Amino acid sequence: MGKLFGTDGIRGEANRYPMDASVAFAVGQAVANIFKKSGHRPTVVIGKDTRISGYMLESSIEAGVSSMGGMSYLVRVLPTPGIAFITQSMRADAGVVISASHNPYQDNGIKIFSGSGFKLSDEQEEAIESLLLGGKLPQMVPEAKDMGRAYRMEDAPGRYIVFLKNTFPRELSMEGMKIVLDTANGATYRVAPAAFTELGAQVEVIHNKPSGLNINERCGSQYTQDLETRVKESGAAIGLAFDGDGDRLIAVDEKGKTITGDQILVICAKVLKDRGALKNDLLVSTVMSNLGLTFACKKLGFKHHASKVGDRYVLEDMQRLGSVIGGEESGHMIFLEKHTTGDGILTALQLIAAMIREGKPLSELAKQMDIFPQKLINVPVTSKPDITTIPKVMEAIRQAERELGDQGRVLVRYSGTQNACRVMVEGPTNEVTEKYCKQIAEAVKAALG
């Protein structure tokens, strides 16, 4: 058995190792075990998205927690950030999320939050992993009288909706604003429409009929075509697309044009700066953010820091540097003074608040950031040596960087999850960008393909 935890918990195809009932049962046991203390029963919140495999994994994790003497609180279908909120507000020891985020229905995953609402530390994940792989969990179970039990938390969605509404400024109103939501047939399908309706918006919802098999299927934050069409047809002020577990947001402006995560970050950071609330005058994103974001930050008068790819690295850098806003181009954004993790609905509320405060349509606000043409080529590789040790590749990179100057950039990195090298080039025109991206990709293919 190899390492189970990746950058975002345990992932895999449902009903196949490691995303099967036996591993899920062991996860429940291990989580309860590491939070066990003398005289204290560990409490674990368990929630899921709408995948059909969620039922099996939920029951298995709950059984594992009970067998180790822990108490489970089942919140059933709730967005990932909602489970983090409930875990923290209930003062539970841990929260377990059953979701594979934006992946198709046949995949699933298990990620774990600590009682503070933040994802587990590397040390805690390692402790769980060593229990899972050590084979000693069956000997650690208590006798029958000390087994735990499970409770259903019927009011969890309502609690989360109240939390979300409280992040929207009280002095602002959405009354009369027409909004279209795409809930990706996923975890936001009930709570998102309720939150926006209760705040006074006129809400239309698409892709809100989960079957267990249609989560993220040509809908949600990765496929905005249906949302673009509906926004234009309905004359809505904005379209909001979430992913399957509700931690991402991609928006569509009133003209039916998709707005990137980078543009949303810039819009929200600018409003925070204008209100004197952009702590340390700093926005954090990742190295994958468009070069236009860096230029926009300079133009608007605040600093920008680029972290490694992955929301956990964004969060680490935000905490280390004292930033209150950060995120990824993919739409995963963290407002650290409002929540411990990325939250698509919360981000949407902050974006709408920015529109109302600025008194401008989203298409106008999006112009604060010019998007540089970007080309990304994934090159399959057979090995992953240090890029700087491959002369032909470095020569191609340096040539592109010389030609682009400050009007573009080159990023070459290996995928963390696949045998691939990602070659990304941004430049002043599509032609120039494509030319250099292909040249570098060819050099990588010749050396490592």
Image: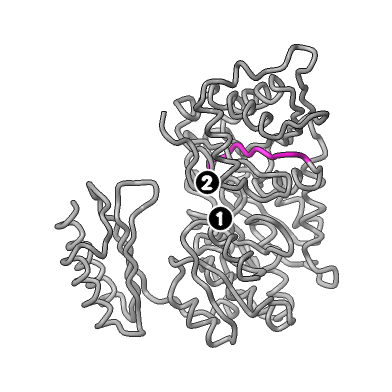
Q: Position of residue 433 (x, y in %)?
A: 29, 74
> Which residues are the magenta region?
92-100
Q: Is residue 403 left or right of residue 145?
A: left
Q: Position of residue 287 (x, y in %)?
A: 44, 67
- Identify the disc placed on residue 140: none
The residue sitting at 62% across, 45% down in the picture is 120
Real-space Cα distance between discs 2 and 1? Answer: 8 Å
**Residue placed most toward the observer, 2 or 139:** 139
In the rendered image, which quarter is residue 395 located in?
Answer: bottom left
Under circle 1, the secondary element is: helix
In the rendered image, which quarter is residue 376 located in?
Answer: bottom left
The residue sitting at 51% across, 25% down in the picture is 134
**Residue placed most toward the observer, 83 or 122:** 122
Quadrant of the image containing the N terminus: top left
Mark 1 lies on residue: 312
Mark 2 lies on residue: 8
Q: Position of residue 220 (x, y in %)?
A: 54, 51
The residue sitting at 53% across, 59% down in the picture is 313
**Number of callouts:** 2
Please tell me whether residue 63 is drawn above or below residue 259 in the rendered image: above
